[in-house]
Amino acid sequence: MPFIARFSFDVPFGKKPAALALCKSWHRLEATLGWPEARVLEGSIGAPESRLEFEYQVESLSDLESMWNKLDDPRVAAFMEEEGNDLAPFVVPASNRWQIFRIRS
């Protein structure tokens, strides 16, 4: 049964364009790591406008675990060490979370 893995966080006021630009670079790295393509969502109605969400569809929880294990790849550390690739200034503290949903239909 497939799953949606959703990573979300809130962005401080006025920083969403810069956060999205950094996330675009991150998604290029994800592609080289073999992660599924993310669907990018922004809060609009009934959700905070500061919210960014990234949805990944995986076929199983073991696929999700494999995806997360790729975070140990040296290319991830190299990306994080490059100047300007620090996501922390764009994340409201304690707002980041992963949520996993089963796809029923």
Image: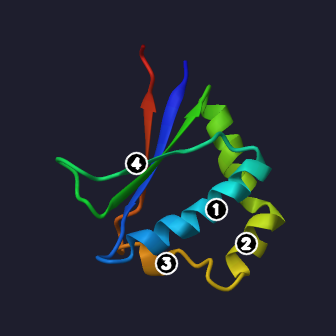
* Callout 1 secondary element: helix
Dividing the picture into quadrants, the one containing residue 83 is bottom right
Circle 2/circle 1 CB separation < 8 Å: yes
Q: Residue furthest left?
A: 46
Label 2 amino acid?
Phe
Q: Residue furthest bottom?
A: 83
Label 3 amino acid?
Ala
- Position in image of residue 86 (x %, y %): 58, 79
Residue bearing the label numbered 2: 79
The N terminus is located in which quarter? top right
* Callout 2 secondary element: helix
Circle 2/circle 4 CB separation < 8 Å: no
The mark nearer the N terminus, 2 or 4, is 4
Q: Residue at x 43, y 70 (%)?
A: 17
Label 1 amino acid?
Trp
The mark nearer the N terminus, 4 or 3, is 4
Q: CA distance from mark 1 to mark 3?
A: 14 Å
Residue bearing the label numbered 3: 88
Q: CA distance from mark 2 to mark 4?
A: 23 Å
Label 4 amino acid?
Leu
Q: Residues within 10 Å of mark 3 (few under 14, many from 20)?
A: few
- Position in image of residue 75 (x %, y %): 80, 65
Q: CA distance from mark 3 to mark 2?
A: 14 Å
Numbered tag placed on residue 26 in the rendering: 1
The mark nearer the N terminus, 2 or 1, is 1
* Callout 4 secondary element: strand
Task: Please state which of the two labelled residues, at mark 1 or mark 3, is closer to the viewer.
Answer: 1
Circle 4/circle 3 CB separation < 8 Å: no
Q: CA distance from mark 1 to mark 4?
A: 15 Å
Task: Please state which of the two labelled residues, at mark 2 or mark 4, is closer to the viewer.
Answer: 4
Residue bearing the label numbered 4: 41
